[in-house]
């Protein structure tokens, strides 16, 4: 589990990365994660979040979600989205002090 958490954290530390196979890029804009062709066409919103990074096989995007818990407090969680299905798994049980 620690290796998975470390891997997901490492993936989530970049704000734009390219798919190795399909030649796409993942990026954030206005607190949302998107993918698009390298030339900017076929843009698709994946989920609300920040700091996206792509899995080595290009099938998933790891990123951080931001949840407002009070007027002045926000909590981040790691999340992984499946590019093909759009399904997002948020890891709320992973400890975070952010």
Image (cartoon, rainbow, N blue to C red):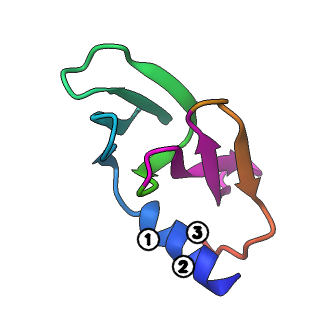
- In the image, residue 12 sits, relative to residue 67, either above or below, namely below
Q: Is residue 16 left or right of residue 74?
A: left
User: In what element is the residue under mark 2?
Assistant: helix
Query: Which class describes the residues within 10 Å of circle 1: few (<14), some (14-19), or many (20+)?
Result: few
| Rendering coords of residue 92 (x, y %) | 78, 61
Query: Which class describes the residues within 10 Å of circle 3: few (<14), some (14-19), or many (20+)?
Result: few
Instruction: Measure the alpha-carbon separation of dots 2 and 3.
Output: 16 Å
Q: Is residue 39 left or right of residue 77?
A: left
Q: Which quarter of the figure is the N terminus placed in?
A: bottom right
| Rendering coords of residue 83 (x, y %) | 55, 35
Instruction: Measure the alpha-carbon separation of dots 1 and 3.
Output: 15 Å
Q: Which dot, 1 or 3, sits closer to the camera?
A: 1
For marks 1 and 3 on the same chain, the one whose residue lies earlier in the sequence: 1
Q: Which residue is mark 2?
A: 6
Give residue 75's quadrant in the image. Answer: bottom right
Q: Which residue is mark 3?
A: 98
Query: Which class describes the residues within 10 Å of circle 2: few (<14), some (14-19), or many (20+)?
Result: few
Q: Which residue is mark 1?
A: 10
The magenta region covers 57-83
Residue located 28% across and 14% down the image: 41
| Rendering coords of residue 28 (x, y %) | 40, 37
| Rendering coords of residue 56 (x, y %) | 41, 57
Q: Which dot, 2 or 3, sits closer to the camera?
A: 2
């Amino acid at each position: 589990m620690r290796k998975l958490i470390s891997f997901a954290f490492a993936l989530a530390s970049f704000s734009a990365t390219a798919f190795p196979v399909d030649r796409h890029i993942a990026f954030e804009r206005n607190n949302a994660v998107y993918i698009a062709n390298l030339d900017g066409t076929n843009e698709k919103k994946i989920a609300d979040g920040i700091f996206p990074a792509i899995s080595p096989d290009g099938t998933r995007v790891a990123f951080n979600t931001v949840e407002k818990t009070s007027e002045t407090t926000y909590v981040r969680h790691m999340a992984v989205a499946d590019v093909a299905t759009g399904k997002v798994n948020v890891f709320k049980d992973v400890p975070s002090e952010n």
